[in-house]
Amino acid sequence: MPANPPASWLRQFLALEAAGGIVLFIAACTALGLANSPAAPLYTGLLKLPLSFRIGALAIDKPLLLWVNDGLMAIFFLLVGLEVKREVFEGELSSLSSAALPTIAAFGGMAAPTLVYIGCNWGDGEALRGWAIPIATDIAFSLAVLALLGARAPRSLKIFLLALAIIDDLGAIVIIGAFYTVQLAPLALALAAVCIAVLAALNLAGISRRAPYLLVGIAVWVCVLKSGIHATLAGVAVGLAIPLRAKDGSSPLRDLEHELHPWVAYGVLPVFAFANAGLRLGDFALGDLLHPVNLGIVLGLFLGKQLGVVGAVWAAVRLGLGTLPEGVDWRQMHGLALLTGIGFTMSLFIGTLAFPGEGYNVEVRLAVLLGSLASAICGWLVLRLRGRPAQPFTRRAAPS
């Protein structure tokens, strides 16, 4: 029997993500508290602290906030790349039958919020840059809410949410690369391509040690940063290059994923939340929520997500493209769809790309927080008030 069977690994993963969601929440609340306290100048001064790195003519000079958003978040995207590769080759996305419904649900959950946002901001070219803000799901927060429900959230519901959120993240990565890229630097882009080719060569050569991949990965990050494409996408490229299986039967990908989870859950994401969730509420008037950008974000997360996911799942089931997860009814699916509106980390991140200046800074962040909070509370209530606790999920035996 394997030392760490898939079921045991999944339980550890879900537990870790739930605990990470709580730490993430504490970090966001701390940032809000500091930004609205006498310590606010120290908080903003810390984020603006300039940090430089130089080797010869190569120089990277950024404030601390951008080192977090461009550098530290690359580690998060590295983990996303690892998760996507594992799910595609061994997990819930490894077969057409198991991947169909969460994939359809994820696409519905991306399309509907986009339409809601565009509907609120039609005709304003600048505002339309934020169309992707409400499309993604925060895995840590959404799984943390499910964890609070105990047996009322069957394991199959958690697996479905995990698969859907990973596809969401993959969609967000594609969108960031395609739509939030500034003017390209051809030389840096060519060097990034060469480094990625080296990563592929390492994989094809059967190199299982992680050090070469990570060293080349640092070079990829620098080249991508200088190329005009957002630097965090380098993390995805490195994650996809890590071998799933080594010649000795070990899994470098699973090992690295397991080691990275605590650092991302308890370090990277909370630091990102601390750096980006601190907004001065005194700079915000309640009427600002009616601004089309803010309205599009809040309604996209709260209404668009649930309508898109439930509508896509309903259509897929009616067309025979999939069936509801075992032990899950439509009310629970609606509760899960609400939880997908917890955009937080990825929504804040895309917001920094869509509106890099100060014009929408406070309002966009508050809209993300309000839309995510409303989705979390309503999703928890729908699942909590469903009735008796759900029966533990047991996988049906395969037909002989």
Image (tube, rainbow, N blue to C red):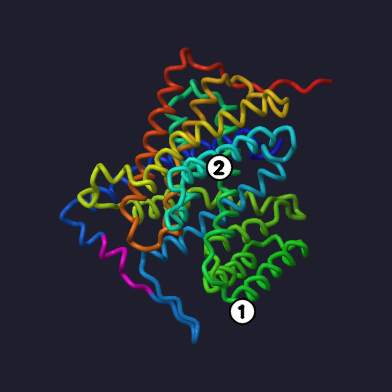
Q: Is residue 45 magenta?
A: yes
Above or below, 84 against 48 in this view is above
Magenta extent:
44-51
Q: What residue occupies the far front of the structure in this picture?
A: 123
Above or below, 37 against 181 in this view is above
The percent coordinates of residue 22 (x first, y second) are 38, 40
- Mark 1 burial class by Cα count in 10 Å: few <14, some 14-19, many 20+: few
Q: Relative to 300, is 370 on the left or the right?
A: left
Q: In the image, what residue type sits under mark 2? A: Met
The percent coordinates of residue 378 (x first, y second) are 40, 28
Q: Secondary structure at mark 2?
A: helix
**Residue shown at the point (64%, 24%) measured from the top left:** 324
Which one is earlier in the sequence, the residue at label 1 or at label 2?
Answer: 2
Above or below, 38 against 26 in this view is below
Q: What residue occupies the far right of the structure in this picture?
A: 400
- Mark 2 burial class by Cα count in 10 Å: few <14, some 14-19, many 20+: many
Q: Which residue is mark 2?
A: 110
Judge by depth and name the residue closer to the eye, 114 or 122.
Answer: 122
**Residue shown at the point (53%, 52%) measured from the top left:** 260
| Distance from the alpha carbon under mark 1 to that under mark 2 | 34 Å
- Image quadrant assignment for residue 159: top right
The percent coordinates of residue 254 (x first, y second) are 63, 49
The percent coordinates of residue 325 (x first, y second) are 63, 25
Above or below, 95 against 213 in this view is above
Q: What residue occupies the far bottom of the structure in this picture?
A: 56
Q: Is residue 119 magenta?
A: no
The reply to whether residue 252 is in sight is: yes
The C terminus is located in which quarter? Answer: top right
Judge by depth and name the residue closer to the eye, 366 or 34.
Answer: 366
Q: Secondary structure at mark 1?
A: helix
Q: In the image, what residue type sits under mark 1? A: Leu
Q: Which residue is mark 1?
A: 187
